[in-house]
Image (cartoon, helix red, strand yellow):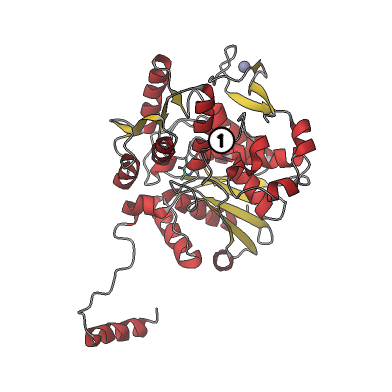
Amino acid sequence: MSFVKGLKCRECGREYSIDPIYVCEFCFGPLEVAYNYEEIGKVLTRKKILSRPLNLWRYKELLPLDKEPEEGQNTGFTPLIKAGNLAKILGIDELYIKDDTVTHPSLSFKDRVVAVALAKAKEFGFDTVSCASTGNLAHSVSAQGARAGLKRFIFIPASLEPSKIIASLVYEPNLIAVDGNYDEVNRLCSEVANKYRWAFVNINIRPFYAEGSKTQGYEIIEQLGWRAPDNIVVPCASGSLLTKIWKSFKEMNDIGLIDNVKTRVFAAQATGCSPIVAAIQQGIDVIKPVKPDTIAKSLAIGNPADGFYATQVIQQTKGFGEHVSDSEIIEAIKLLAKTEGVFAETAGGVTLASTIKLIKKGYIKKESRTVICITGNGLKTQEALGGHTVSPHHIKPNMKSFEEVLKKIKSKDR
Ligand SMILES: *Cc1c(COP(=O)(O)O)cnc(C)c1O
Ligand SMILES: [Zn+2]
């Protein structure tokens, strides 16, 4: 079934066979999966996709697996919500939320990449999976790895949100909490990966793992009626999701399922960790690493592995980038909830708040069609909202007490 040609260096183009490797031996460039698009175009039709179950294997010809795996049956095909209430407030005609806060087993888009990574790890014959995580990856590998019957070593910064730590621990992985930030955790994991024969989903099998992000893009195209949006706003940590969404749009065009793609791709980051947006705003493609300091911990990668490629995509598509403060993130989480009924984690607040700025500055035009990627569920980062929500109305268990409160509420007209 596989249409994979092999791995290819993104820098020098040198080709490699399919193995758990991720850097080019000659130039140290990152490796990427290469496909035979001509053959895929002959077999993959809209009709065939529409006939398949609503999960990420709908687009299996465009994923790097040899056969359809048991993993991931409950992952993917999240809703695309037409956000009329929010669009009105933002002053634009057409806005959609790609809602990756629901449907997935661990309630974030990371389940897409993990489903592909674990399936590939099994094909390679690994019995242990591992990762360096900013939170959601830990949750997803813990959960999906449990079901897949794999041993799990999960490395996180010890300072992660308590709710994300519990969300991982319930599946009983070996959770290693490191006194350091994500970039330090990642460096340690590279050393561990050299010594132990484990599948590190975002290190030695990263080329395969990263391909899972493309499924978000395919779904958006299918759900928009087989066309790409005019604008897409993507939250960035390593920058991988942004580059893969762009790759997915181009692939759909390459295999003849959609017309030419004219989408402008926009990056969203938190001010306390915005190395990609900083490069974009300065008009350069050199990423200057930063020390993260933001409530958007899932995006807190100071030295983003795909930062350079993300800036290339943004420049090529005439997009831009915005960064937002912690208080703007909280306000945007609340706005999304009260207008569209979607409860996003801090990364979702980053995306919406950045979108608001992009509209104000004229980068996103009123009459264009915009998709924003809301990538994780708000139940995972409730701490961030502490003291920032409205309060409950406390009453005694009788009618009198209730009606007193009701009067107060009505006088405020809420
Ligand atoms: C990991 C993550 C992202 C972005 O990831 P990339 O490393 O840029 O691919 C976005 N949103 C959430 C909620 C995440 O957990
Ligand atoms: Zn190379």
Quarter of the figure with residue 388:
bottom left
Give the residue type at disc 1.
Pro
Kindly identify the residue that appears in the image at 72 percent across and 46 percent down.
48
Where does the image place residue 127, in percent across and percent down from the top left? 43, 24
Observer-nearest residue: 249 or 166?
166
Where does the image place residue 208, in percent across and percent down from the top left? 56, 29
Q: Residues within 10 Å of mark 1 (few under 14, many from 20)?
A: some
Query: Which image quarter is the C terminus in?
Result: bottom left
From the viewer's perspective, is 102 left or right of 168? right
Residue on which disc 1 sits: 69
From the viewer's perspective, is 257 left or right of 102? right
From the viewer's perspective, is 5 left or right of 174? right
Query: Which image quarter is the N terminus in?
Result: top right
Observer-nearest residue: 354 or 75?
75
Kindly identify the residue that appears in the image at 58 percent across and 68 percent down.
88
| Furthest residue in direction top, as rendered | 26
Observer-nearest residue: 154 or 394?
154
